Every structure is written in structure tokens, then in C-alpha cells.
Amino acid sequence: MTHDRRATKRPIAILISGRGSNMRALIDACAAPDFPARIVLVLSNRPDAPGLAVAQAAGLPTASVDHRPFRGDREAHERAIDETLRAAGVELVCLAGYMRLLTPFLTGAWAGRMLNIHPSLLPAFPGLHTHERALAAGVKLHGCTVHLVTEVMDDGPIIGQAAVPVHADDTPDRLAARVLQQEHHLYPAALRKILEPHGDAAPATDRLLFL
């Protein structure tokens, strides 16, 4: 039975720009024999991204497609990324702190096969500085969202969300730390949900809200 599950693991890539905190959670999840994905590539737009060293230490193939030589031509940069992904046999892409706005070329090429994790309960607070904005708005719940990537930033169909309460004495850093803990649980669970849509993807916690 274990052999069969390993044989059906789907090849995925993780795109990062920095330290790859959520990448680490996905690496740990994919190491389980019964997890439905295997990481065949970790790719960054920054050759010096610390997450590349983390992936290499885990024995994973890595690549960098530096965006700087493509300055002014985002699509050309994305075509180079797309070529690298396809050469690695990737079937699904997970964005994990990939800090580049995508053009319609890449979102179209991987439509329905590219996930992103965002630190808010979308559709609230798309874009940057989500924790500061949540505190300024006085919301009682904050959290994170895994969604399919579309041409519109942070606007694709929601796969799952995890919520945390907002405390009266919260700072953006304190709130961000609690949300990040939930991100590390949510992303692997949402990936499993995509790859095993008829299975039970959610761990035993009422903070995971699968829509």
C-alpha cells in the first residue's frame, strides 16, 4: 500500500523569493509516505534567497531564474521560469513567499495548477501589510488563505482558510507570528485537498475552514 501511494505522488514545484518558511512546512509534509505530492524543484527569482540553501540541505533540486537581467520584460522572465518548470516535470506550482507580481502569461499557463498562500482572510486585505491593516480596521478575526492563482492579485478561488483571534494588545509582529503558525498547517492541508479532493484534508482543528 505504501508503495502504491509513493508511486502516485504528484510532482510539484515551490517558488520562493526569501527564506521559505512555508516551503519548509511543505517539505516536511511531502516527506510523509502517504502525502500525495513530491517536490521536484524549488525555484527562486533571487539567486541569494536563503530558502534555496534550506531546500538543498533537504536534498531537493533547486534553480534560480534571476529577474534582474529581464528588467522591463516580466513575461520574458516568466517564460524562462515556465521552461524550467516544464523541464523538471512539474504538474502543480506552490507560491511560498514569491514576491513578484505575475503576468497573464504565467497565470494562464498554470491556470488551475498554481496555489498561493496569503496572510489574511481573503477577500479582506489583499496585497501587502495585511497585519497592520487588520489591526487598523479593528477586526476580531484574522488569518490566512490558500487560493488558486489567477490574473487578478489575491483574487482566485479559495481552497482553505485558517483563522486566529485578534487580541486587544496585539502588535503586527505578534499577530503575524500567530498567523504564520497557521499558515504552516494550512498550506500542506490545502495542497492535499487539491490533490485528493475526495479525501479528508483537514487536520483535527476547528481553525481550518475548508470552503
Image (cartoon, grey):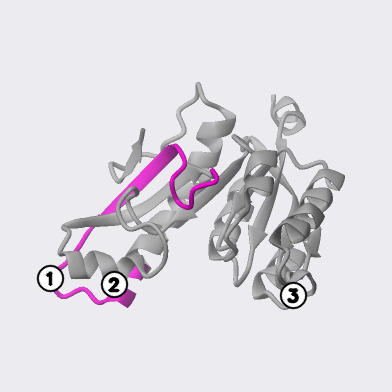
Where does label 2 land, which residue?
132
In-front residue for pair 82/131: 82
Q: Hey, which quadrant is residue 17 in on the image?
A: bottom right
Under mark 1, the amino acid is: Ala
Give the mark, 1 or 3, whose residue is nearer the N terminus.
Answer: 3
Classify residue 117 as left or right of residue 130: right
Circle 3 SS class: helix
Q: Nearer the viewer, mark 1 or mark 2?
A: 2
Where does label 3 land, which residue?
68
Under mark 2, the amino acid is: Glu
x and y percentages locating residue 148 in the rendered image: 52, 41
Quadrant occupied by the N terminus: top right
Q: Hey, which quadrant is residue 96 in on the image?
A: bottom right
x and y percentages locating residue 122 in the rendered image: 34, 49
Task: Find out whether residue 152 is within the magenta segment.
Answer: yes
Quadrant occupied by the C terminus: top left
Please count the marks in the image: 3
Circle 2 SS class: helix
Give the mark, 1 or 2, whose residue is nearer the N terminus.
Answer: 2
Q: Nearer the viewer, mark 1 or mark 3?
A: 3
Q: Residue at x 56, y 45 (%)?
A: 115
Circle 1 SS class: loop
Q: Tags 1 and 2 in contact by the CB under 8 Å rule?
A: no
Q: Relative to 30, is 3 above or below?
A: above
x and y percentages locating residue 102 in the rendered image: 61, 55
Under mark 3, the amino acid is: Arg
x and y percentages locating residue 136 in the rendered image: 20, 70
Q: Residue at x 73, y 33 (%)?
A: 6
Q: Marks 2/3: CA distance?
A: 30 Å
Where does label 1 land, which residue?
168
Q: Write down the region rendered in magenta.
A: 150-176
